[in-house]
Image (spheres, grey):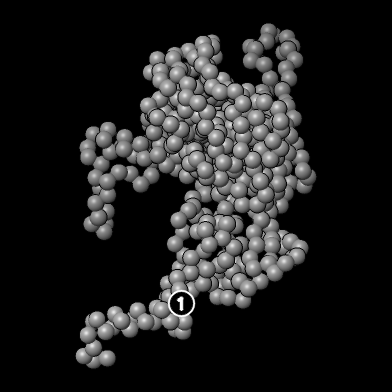
Amino acid sequence: MYGTSSQEIARMINTLKKGTVGYQTPLVPAGGSQTASNLSPLVPQQLANTLSVATSTMQDLKLWPMLSKVMAQNTVVEYNRVLNHGGEHSPFISEGGLAPLNRSTYEKVAVQVKYLAERRQISDQATLMNITGGAPDALAEETRRGTEALLRRMEKELFHGDSTINPLSWDGMIKQIRAGGNVLDKRGASITANDLAETLGTLYSAPFYGMVTHILVTPRVLAKLIKDTTSGGRHDQLAIRESARFVYGSRSIYITAPYGEVEVVACPFLERHDRIAPALGVSSVYDGNVNTPVVSVQPVAGANASSQFVANDNGTYYYRVVGVGANGISLPVDANSVAVVAGDRVSFTLTADSTVDFFRIYRSTKTASDANGSLLIAEVKNTAGVPVVFNDDNNKIPDASEVLMINNSPEYNCYYQLLSLTRRPLAQTSTSLPFLLMMFGAPAVKLPTKQYLITNVGA
C-alpha cells in the first residue's frame, strides 16, 4: 500500500466495517446491566486479556480474614461466659475466722448458625468459549465473581447484621458489642487519636479489663486521622524513603494503649455501600418481584422527649424508602417534605406486601430540595400488609459511621463455621448451568464488655 493516500486508507477501513467478513461488531450486553444474559463482554476480540474490576475486590475484606474460624457441629452453638469471679467484698478475716462464701457468675450464650448463598448460572455455550481474564473458562470466572459478591455482602453483615430486622440474618458485631453496654455516641463529631487513646485506657481499667488489638474504622475516618498526624505534628510529616520518594502522611497508624500499640485498620465495608439512596425509578430486582412500598401516612413532626434533633438541625427534610426482599430491592418511593425544629420527632407509616422483608429509610440534608442523594438512617422490619410506623428521633446521624475497638483473639471473637465456602451444582433444566455458592456460620462476640463501640462518628 505504498503511496496510498490517507483518504483511500480511510475508505478501505470504512468498507471493512460495513462488511460481514473479517470484522467483529462491538459486543455490548443487551441493556448494559446484570439483566443481560449474554457473555459478550467476556468474549475476546483484541489482545486485552485482563478484566478491569470496577467494584470491590478480595483485598477489601478486612474483618473476615481477621476472625478466627471455629468449626460448628450443630446449627446452634452454646458456650459459657464468665461474668465475674465473685463479689468484691473485703478479703481479710480475723484470726481463726472463716471467709464468707463467694461465687462466680456465669451465663450460657447461644449463637444460631445462619445460611448464606449466591446463585449464579452460565449458558452451555459459554462453557465452550475462551473468555477474557485470568480464568480459562466461564464457570471459573463466574465462580470467582460470585465468590467476591457473596463475601462482600457477608463482610457487611458481619458488621451491620440485625436479626430483628431480617430474621434470616445473624446479629453483627456492632449489635453484639452494643449489647455489652460500652457505647459512645459522638453525635456527628469527628474522632481524634486522643479520643481513641483515652478509650483504650478506660477499657483496660477495672471493671472492664479489655485489651484491644485492632481499631476498625471506615477509610474516611482513617484518612482524617492521617490528616491529623500530618497537620498536628511538631515537625512536617514529610518523609524521604530509600527510593528517594517523598511520602506525605503515615502509611499506618497505631494508638498507644497502656499495654502496647493498637493498629487502626480501614475497613471499606464498615462504610455501607447502600448508605446512599438509589435514584427514583431504579431497582435491583433480577429475579422475581419486590413490590414498591406505600407511604400510607405522610411524615408529620411533633415534639417528643426522645428526640435528638437540636437547634442546628432545624430545617425541611425529605425521606426516600425502598423495600428489600429475598429477590432484591424495590423501586424507591418518596414521602412529602416535613419541617423539623429542635425536639421534634418525625413519624410516618409504611405498608408493603410479602415481597418486602424490611424497609430502608433515607433522609436528605436540611438544605436539600428533594430526596435525591439522601442518606441511610434506619432499617425497619416489615409485616406483610400491616402498617409499620417509623419514628425518626435523629438517633442515626446521616453519613456518620461506627468505630469498633475489638480483640481478634478467639477468646473474644470468632466465627462459628458449619460449612465453609462451597459450590453446589443445581439441577439443569435448560441449556444453562446453574449453581449455588454457599456458606453456613455466624459471628460470635464472646466478650462484648471488653470491647467498645463508638457511633455517629463524623468524617
Q: Is residue 141 above or below residue 66?
A: below
Q: Position of residue 184 (x, y in %)?
A: 49, 24
Q: Nearer the viewer, residue 219 or 50?
A: 50
Measured as percent of width and height from the top left, residue 350 is found at: 62, 28
Q: Position of residue 8 (x, y in %)?
A: 26, 84
Where is residue 106? Give x, y as percent.
Answer: 72, 26
Residue 261 seen in this snapshot: no
Provide the residue designation for mark 1. 24
- Quarter of image, res 296: top right
Q: Nearer the viewer, residue 427 or 209?
A: 427
Towards the viewer: 130 or 155 = 130
Which residue is at the far right? 74
> What secondary structure is found at the residue carrying circle 1?
loop
- Viewport quadrant of the C terminus: top left
Quadrant location of the N terminus in the rendered image: bottom left
Q: In the rendered view, tell whether residue 322 sits above or below residue 289.
A: above
Q: Is residue 358 above or below residue 24?
A: above
Identity of the residue drawn at 55% across and 69% down: 135
The residue shown at (64%, 68%) is: 123
Q: Nearer the viewer, residue 306 or 202?
A: 306
Question: Residue drawn 57% across and 53% down?
Answer: 149
Q: Residue furthest bottom?
A: 2
Q: Inspect the image, locate mark 1, and give the three-letter code of the amino acid beneath it.
A: Gln
Residue 12 in view: yes
Report the residue at 48% width, 12% height from top: 343
